[in-house]
Image: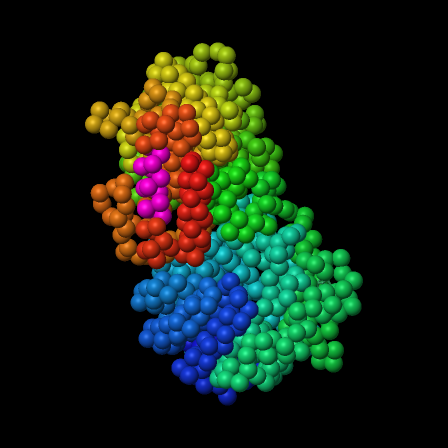
Amino acid sequence: MLKVHSRCDLSCDHCYVYQHADQTWRGRPVRMPPATVRAAARRIAEHAREHKLPVVHVVLHGGEPLLLGAAGLREVLAELRTAITPWTRLDLRMQTNGVLLDEELCRLFVEYDVKVGVSFDGDRVANDRHRVFAHGGSSHEHVRRALALLRRPEHRASYAGILCTIDVRNDPDRVYEALLAEDPPRVDLLLPHATWDHPPQRPGPDPTPYADWLGRIHRRWVDDGRPMSIRMFEALHPGGGGTEAFGLAPADVLVIEADGSWEQVDSLKTAYHGAAGTGFDVFEHSVDEAARHPAVAVRQDGADGLCATCRACPVLDRCGGGLYAHRWRTGSGFDNPSVYCADLLRLIETVDAYPPPAPPASAEWSATSPVEEVLDDLATGHGSPSTLTLLAATQLSITRALLASCRDRSGTTAAWELLVHLDRAAPEAVRAVLEHPFVRPGLVHRLDPWALPGVRAAVDPLPALAIAAALRAGIPAVLRVPVRADAITLPTLGSLVLPGLGESAEVTVRPGGFQVRAGSVERTVLLDPLAPPPAGWLPTRDVPVPAGRLLVEDGDPYRDCYGQPVTSRLDGPAARALGRTLAEAWRVVHRDVPAHAAALDGGLRAVVPLAPDPARPLRSATARHAFGAVAVTPHPDPETVAVLLVHEWQHAKLGAVLDLYDLVEPNQGTRIRVPWRPDPRPPEGVLQGVYAHLAVTQVWQSRAATDPGDASAHAARYLAWTRDGADALLASRSLTEAGERFVGQLRHALEETRVGSR
Ligand code: SF4
Ligand code: SF4
């Protein structure tokens, strides 16, 4: 943590820098001098080099770092990148109050890949309770403006999240809603700094007000489907991994003050004057020397560094004695439980008593699997079934987060409440609906009508989702559902087309079906697969494939998210013919490339028929928001369709990976020439092409074993395209470190493929 500016433009009364026991800031330079920045950068680089560290995190901090101005910050960032990047990956971050943030600074942070966290305590009442200017004026609107700037698509990559210091006098629901409204990637909830000498405020008789206040937010967060990451709750869940404030992991933070002093974590300033000092500085002492200071070393000892009470505590491994500074008491020093001990114990009980719905089996796997494992596995060309399960699970959690964001756009909470109820009573039914590939496009469209190609009326998607889940669960329910073009579409089940319904209709779920009513129009639909569908009910149709059933999706209004014309509902013979071709094509994939077939089995749920175009009879497509589906022109030849399925499924998998990891450096104007297109392509497009062509190469090489003629020629062409594309990508320097690893491994897989084909 680098204290680049030691003064602040706010005057928060809960600030540990200026308002607590330590007052060392008074003797420090206002700005960190350039020579000190240089020395600090050299020390960090030296440490990374000697210990071969894969990554170093540097947080620009203060006071208020933005007081350095754009030019001053640019100098600091350039110095850090120049000195450290040759030796390790530099993860640059900043913690700011946001007051001075403007577009120029946002552009600078995007340019230098700085992730910015903003201190913000919630709604206006909560924020202005402490976070005010010296004249007492509110900072609330200033900070909200800063958060809005960071949310913009062009700056979003630099939005790290919100740091919120809690006060139990604030309304937890309002604070939660204010935080959620800012759409932060992550929220850090901080207990106000306190010690046994200066205990926290406990208004009223409640012995654990902090646990109860946080417990209320935890419940909202779980009920909402965990729409944002809240680090405290994630850390407190069993196996959550801990943070600086929880758990037994060794402390791994050192502070470099504006005068170059090495210090311990800032929060110690709350204990006593000079508590964070080490007596070392960056000019004379290395990181290792600072880390060997006894007060730092004791925090590497896990449970052995804690007091006897904590060592005997049943939640020791999850609480870890709380934040080090909160243990301070004159006389016994830090050899005490946290001053928040009772609250921490109660909070852990509260978190345990209201767990999130059971995660998919893959979540445990994902928690222990590093990024490299996932990328290396996918770079084989196909990816293992467990990686596919992981990608599907993460796609589902994105859909859940969008669902929670859409809740606030609903005029009524009835659909949301029904979904929350069903998620507890019949989670498999809700899951089956939310996994439908065209749910996410519907939610995205609701949040941003211009985000998708095609023009559709904007309707609230939640009621139809809730009714579809209730029908699948067989649980009675009644909701008003919006009507679009005389139709109500229930994802995964079908559409009811009934003129005269108007803009919305009351839908009642009954045993075996549902009833729709709008004015004098009424229709009952029984979902009996053996009986002919009632007039106006157009059920979805599927075909058996090795993995289960594949939907031929020609009814969902969001299936046009591919930017290409789709067919209207196919008649019976055409739908059956397409289904037969798809099922046969799937078997062909199993015959040619079983590993790719296993990846198809792991995630492909629907195929959308594209409208025929005589000029381009063979087309296919994938949409980033519609994981689990691909679009193809109906084609009678299963051998041809098999190649299309493999090709498009590669795009779907890579799209899901790109939702998780940055493989391409953001905001570049780079264009790369590739052999399969006449026009130069952006790096992400080339990456997609390379990944798809790798799989197609593998298909043709397999076929070449029995058909050396055309198949060998196809294999050679795709092999050359993939190799040239991968080499061009690696040479372009447009990939992140993870991207370079991925393409490097993929290149390796290609060599293996080539050797295997000889
Ligand atoms: S913005 Fe941060 S550094 Fe500034 S006074 Fe408030 S808490 Fe302290
Ligand atoms: S709950 Fe209390 S006793 Fe238990 S580890 Fe935490 S601070 Fe120590």
Give the quadrant of residue 409.
top left
At 43% from the left and 68% from the top, the residue drawn is 86
The residue lying toward the viewer, choosing from 78 and 737, is 737
Q: Is residue 284 above or below residue 660?
A: below
Q: Please provide the residue range marked out in magenta.
A: 714-726
Question: Does the magenta stretch mainly form a helix, a strand or a loop?
Answer: helix
363 in the magenta segment: no
Residue 49 in view here: yes
At 55% from the left and 61% from the top, the residue drawn is 189
The residue lying toward the viewer, choosing from 315 and 54, is 54
At 46% from the left and 33% from the top, the residue drawn is 596
- Answer left or right for 392 relative to 325: left
Residue 130, x across and y down, in percent: 51, 70
Residue 149, x across and y down, in percent: 35, 60
The residue lying toward the viewer, choosing from 592 and 233, is 592
In this view, the residue farthest toward the top is: 531
716 in the magenta segment: yes
